[in-house]
Amino acid sequence: VCLANALMPCVKGSESMQRKALLTSLCRLSIPYWGESSNTSHLEEHHIACLQVLFGVMHRHYDALQNDWYIILCTLEYLSSFSISSPALSNIWIKKSVLISSCITRLSPFTTCLSDDSLKCFVSALVDVSNAWVANASKPKPPREEGGPFASRGDPTTSSGEDGSHRQKESSGMTGRFFSFAGRAFGGGSDHDFKGRKDSFDASVARVRASKTYAEDFCNTVYSRIDATKSETKKEVFHGLSFSLIALTDVALCNLFRYSCFGPVVATHLRDVALSSTATEIRLFAIDTLMNIIRVQLSHESSDSNSQRSGGGSHSIRASAVSLQDYLCVDEVQVHDTNAADRSKLLQADLLAPLCDAVKGTDKVDTAEAGLNALNGILEGSGHNLSGDAWIPLISAIGELSGCPEIEGSDGKAKVDRTLPAWSTCSMLSFRCLKLIVDDFLDELPSPPHPSAVETRSALLECCAAFGRSQHDVNTSLTATGMLWTIADQDLTPASLDHVLSMLALLSFDRRVEVRNCSVNTLFSCVVGLGDSLSAAQWRLCLSQTLFGVLEEISARGSQHEVERDTLNASNSTEKKSNRYKVTVHHSRDSSTKQWGTTQVLALRGLERVLRQFFPKLLLAATCTSNHDSAEIDNIDAGDFDSGSAWFKTTWARILDFAYNCATLTGGRDTLDLRVVGADLMVLCAQLSSKAGVGAASTPARVGTNMQVINGALRSVKPSRMDQTSAGKEQAPMIDNDTVEYRRLLFLMAFKRLEELCVDLEHQS
């Protein structure tokens, strides 16, 4: 004791070998065994004396220990499993043993007095000790290593013998002689000597009353603090965790006022524990701790009184401590830390990233479910406090568990197949989070000119599309498809609108007929609903690329299924030539080819809606493109379109060709709807491009003789010349000659196709 108190102030510097040797000796002499668990091992008086000195060193030199915290925390980890009471202790020493347990319960508040650098070293040491314990969580204590816990950090002063006992290494030089002397000064020696001395206590082992361990009071104290944050970890599970993991959680919560200086280390460790631990309880505790830290930090950021945070720099170490009763005690002082808000400030994206990475990277269903419940709780409790940069990792994590088969593994790791039925609950929970964002927080998302606005909106659209392609639940896919339209209504910028239409076009090729048809209807409804806000350049992209891309892809896939069906029928007929009776498939059978034909009919009907609603605007945009929209058109790839007003003429020809091909299909009643819609589309094109327009075709034709019965006699009645003139002026639209000529050209193209259809029909009949 005298040696420790005398030499600790003399050995300065974070890498002092003399201090490391002194602390190593002191820690080794504080407990009976390193790396072993024995029911017959109990603390003796010299162990309590060494622990008393150790806590005195911690109290007096707390900011000078730096990297040597690892040795001390390893000692506390091993000590936590020992019983406070021992048959080898008298009543006086048992009281001191209880006081040591009280010192351990004060460990977390004590860390609020450490400097930022010392706290970083303290947390890093806790992480290293916790890693050793998590690596072998089936054991109640950290795994035994050669030379105890000190060898893992490269300390050369200890080693392990072949017989499993820890021997003190005699090394040459001053360090070895000093270490040996320090061990003997504290009554140390080899473990064989100790085993011989403890034989006298074997008879009294049976008389030891049931006693709690050193970790029990500490766990109860920490659990009471964590339970106040609405933790979901049960008490019996909490008591089964390691001392280092519990201490790391409590130290983080007590030092949230300066979380930015050590938080990333803690969060990264908890993320790694959630991803790598084989014990379910440990993984769920890590997720729960991450959620509590994030939730408390977000709630503190929304509060104006940052100085009232837990441990907000208003504590100081008790300077007058001379006994175990005062060791690690802190006193409150009236000192206000004006930099508390800055020291706790951490980008919300960095705050959420470890939890989101754990959700995305885990291959365990229970961990993913716990992470998604945590994200949902964060959204419900603090979603209104999230800043612009925090939404991107959160939305990305939600989309990763959608069950979309096209999503690859993150960071080049092996892909986790989340399309399996076991992940269906995760898909449901993640969709609940997405629905909460779209329904309640869509207005909270960053909008231009925020730097993350475009990336956030893009991530949200990709997430909706991922759920649209999810294979777990059709209703989820249908709802996600509708969300795309909701997002389009909220953000009418060209980039967002084009992205929405491309996502809907992608979903229009889904193999499930319900999702495919819903996506086609939503796509054309979105174009019709938002068509007034589209510019001429956007219309060119929409018609020439998006809509026609959907029509051509649906037609190609329908033809592919038809070829596969014909090939299958031919092979079946070859194999069954000897069969006398042949089965004829009824036309009402819902085959894959017929389903794709139904989707194609929906797409053509949607194109009819677009043309009927916006043909005048398209005609005006086509004739005015070369003069009024030249600047906007310059931003489009010149290879995609013809120059000037010729783009609409090309598109018009493609529409007529597509309709003609559908109208002239050969087949039975399974293609009847497709032939009818093709003919209807051609007739509509002719009506729209005619001089009278489609309105004249929809108005019933009436034949009148200008005769009226007046006083029982039939008389001729004609409108006045003035009425005829005024009526004509009101009905005549103001259209320039170029537009009239362009419209006449489109009508001739449509009418020519109609004539060809009539000839083809007569030929077929």
Image (cartoon, helix red, strand yellow):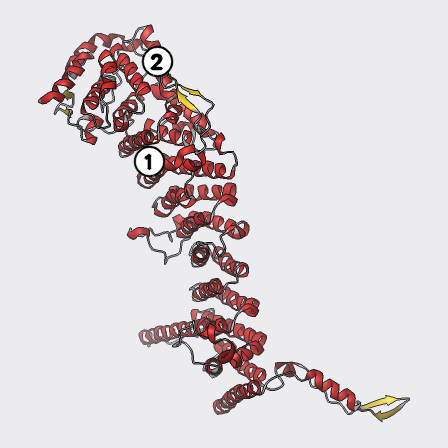
Q: Is residue 253 visible?
A: yes
Give the mark, 2 or 1, whose residue is nearer the N terminus.
1
Label 1: how many residues lie within 10 Å, few (<14), some (14-19) or many (20+)? Answer: some
- Residue 478 in the image: above or below residue 201: below
Q: Is residue 183 above or below residue 501?
A: above
| Residue 166: percent from left, percent from top | 16, 21
Q: Nearer the viewer, residue 558 or 376?
A: 376
Q: Report the amino acid beneath label 1.
A: Ala
Q: Amino acid at mark 2?
A: Leu
Q: Give the residue displayed 78% in from the left and 87% down from the top.
A: 723
Is 49 situated left or right of 542 in this image?
left
Q: Position of residue 452 (x, y in %)?
A: 44, 54
The disc label shown at residue 324, or none:
2
In the rendered image, which quarter is residue 683 located in?
bottom right
| Residue at position x 49%, y 64% in the image | 497
Q: Quadrant of residue 698?
A: bottom right
Residue holding disc 1: 279
User: How many other residues sit within 10 Å of disc 2, few (<14), some (14-19) or many (≥20)?
Assistant: many
Callout 2 secondary element: loop
